Image: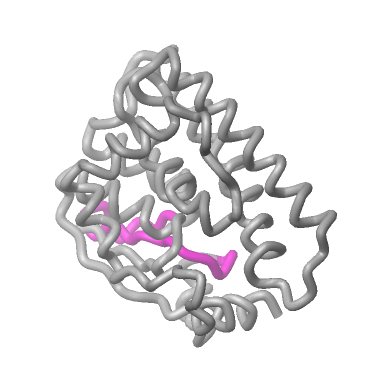
Amino acid sequence: MIELFTAETPNGWKISIALEEMGLPYTWRHIRLSEQEQKQDWYLALNPNGRIPTIIDHDNDDFVVFESGAILIYLAEKCGKFLPADPKGRSHVIQWLMFQMAGVGPMMGQANVFYRYAPEKIPYAIERYQREVRRLFEVLDRQLSRNEYLAGDYSIADIATFPWVRGYDWSGVSIDGLDNLRRWLDAIAARPAVQRGLEIPPRVDLGEGDRETIERARKLLV
């Protein structure tokens, strides 16, 4: 049994989606970021970085894995799905997984901070990160013009990237003209396992008027 420690963020949804797609039995615990639960000693003993997600594999001597990309690789290897066994296919998937980990996630995160959460609006920072996010989206769109999914077949690269890209509007970035990216978003969003994974934990309203969400996020940035 996998025990998942998570919250309602793109990195958390990566793992709940993966677990649903893989059909692995799991339980989950909601880590309340606004209450700084991720900084408590008991959690830091599992994840020294004090972030979500984290898993414990109780079927493997209570083995702990943190960092969402590392968790996805571990789970894919455990179940034998969504990560090819051959070296070239495996590398192809991991390259696009790292593209998300090193590029899409951090750049969208910064765009969110400066566009949505920062109490002082700094146009240079907003434009810089939104421009970089759009550039990364264009890279994805070109790749998806040649492939149904990022590495050919549906894989942990798609599972990692989808929860971030779907929040393009929250980052203030348009996907107009990126028809391949939009097709990919729609196809993944229609998957029943993805829909189930996005409900763990239950989603919050990220609408324009959700001041509570913004204020909660600002507290985490202090």
Q: Which of the pair 159/78 is nearer the observer?
A: 159
174 on left or right of 180? right
Residue 214 percent coordinates (x, y): 56, 77
Q: Which of the pair 98/213 is nearer the observer?
A: 213
Q: Which of the pair 4/14 is nearer the observer?
A: 14
The quadrant where residue 6 appears: bottom left
Residue 217 can be seen, yes or no: yes
Q: Is residue 115 above or below residue 168?
A: below
Residue found farthest to the bottom: 35
Q: Which residues are magenta?
A: 48-65
Please tell me which residue is depicted at 61% across the width and 56% down the height of the picture: 109
Residue 61 can be seen, yes or no: no
Residue 54 percent coordinates (x, y): 41, 61
Please tell me which residue is depicted at 58% across the width and 26% down the height of the picture: 139
| Count of marks overlaid on the render | 0
Question: Please, which colouring scheme is shown?
Answer: one colour
- Quarter of the image for the N terminus: give it: bottom left
Please tell me which residue is depicted at 36% across the width and 68% down the height of the picture: 5
Q: Is residue 168 above or below residue 199?
A: above
Q: Which of the pair 191/7 is nearer the observer?
A: 191
28 on left or right of 126? left
The quadrant where residue 205 appears: bottom left
Please tell me which residue is depicted at 44% across the width and 22% down the height of the picture: 144
Residue 40 percent coordinates (x, y): 52, 83
Q: Is residue 54 magenta?
A: yes
25 on left or right of 120? left
- Quarter of the image for the C terminus: give it: bottom right
